[in-house]
Amino acid sequence: MIVRRTIGGFLAAALLVGALAGCGEKGKENVAVSYKGGTLTVEDLEAHRKLLSRQSMFRGNPERLTPEFVKEHAVNMEMIIAKGLKEKLHQDPRLRAEIHGFMADLFLKVMQEQLVTKIDRKDLREEEVRAYYEKNKDSYRTPALYGFSVIKSANEAKLAALRKRIASGELSFAAAAERYSSDEQTKKAKGYAGRLPLERVQPGMREELAKLSPKQISGVLKHNDSFYLVQLLEKTEPRQYSYEEKAEYVRNDLLYSHYRDEWEKTYDRLKKEFDVQEHAPVLQRFGKEKPAPAGGA
């Protein structure tokens, strides 16, 4: 994307303002600046001054925001908008996505309470909070955690020989990992791979790791085109937190759950209001297309 961050912030805001140029007019006597395609009213300039005053460079130096400076800044911005519109940049799908993302965020801030009524956390009944805890008990449970080290190699036979040297006491697992492992990240940490729940361990070593006792070393394991030795260092048993321990977290989670439900209803209502129609053949074609590389042109 062309100057992605600039477009995402300043220019996206500018294009939005340009698209709405003249909407705030209160008669010609209130127009401070006019140009081909739009106007700037006194209200526009005042809004622009307030926007600039929130920037760090002006927050401690409000005297810099003179009427002349604000006018020049606003006009310069409008000229960029006018040129961009003339070049039809606002019709480029990549830029439209940026502009619409900015508009959605801005409009959401303005309309949030209008779209979804505020839910007071204090109004959630105790029995409702407890029922939410019981229904989502696994969310308040710490799974078993496995601290382990690995040695990676592309050669199964060499790894098997290395395991014998470790088992004989000739080498420690940490020293062997530091000297022979082909995985650069864990090699620097002397084989240490982290402290993880089983579901975050790669499938090739997950089942074996679950069987090991602390300090025990696995046999040679294969995952994809590589071979591994795994040593379990420690295991922390799972813990189920009681409702009393997590009551405030549960109340917050229930509140967010209510908000999610209300937002789903709001989006359904808006889709009906604006008669959203999905065109299946085109959507199927979109689904089959490969995503464009991140960072675009």
Image (cartoon, rainbow, N blue to C red):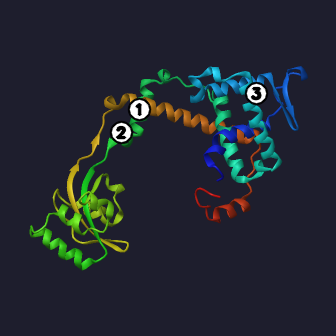
Label 3 vs 1, first from the N-terminus? 3
Q: Which tag is nearer the camera, tag 3 or tag 2?
A: 3
Q: How many marks?
A: 3
Q: What residue would you read off at disc 1?
A: 250
Residue found at x 64% / y 20%: 63
Give the vertical position of 232 relative to 34 (above or below): below
Q: Are marks 3 and 2 in contact (CB under 8 Å)?
A: no
Q: Residue furthest right?
A: 28
Q: Would you identify the image quadrant in which residue 135 lies?
A: top left
Residue found at x 37% / y 29%: 247
Label 3 vs 2, first from the N-terminus? 3
Secondary structure of the residue carrying tag 2 is helix
Q: Quadrant of the C terminus?
A: bottom right
Q: Are marks 2 and 1 in contact (CB under 8 Å)?
A: yes
Label 2 vs 1, first from the N-terminus? 2
Question: Which residue is more in the foreground, 131 or 144?
Answer: 144
Left or right, residue 222 beside residue 278: left
Left or right, residue 87 beside residue 296: right
Residue found at x 50% / y 33%: 256
Secondary structure of the residue carrying tag 1 is helix
Q: CA distance from mark 2 to mark 1?
A: 9 Å
Question: Which residue is more in the foreground, 74 or 129?
Answer: 74
Q: What residue would you read off at disc 3?
A: 71
Q: Would you identify the image quadrant in which residue 267 lies?
A: top right
Residue 29: percent from the left, percent from the top?
89, 20
Left or right, residue 102 beside residue 187: right
What number is the disc on residue 156?
none
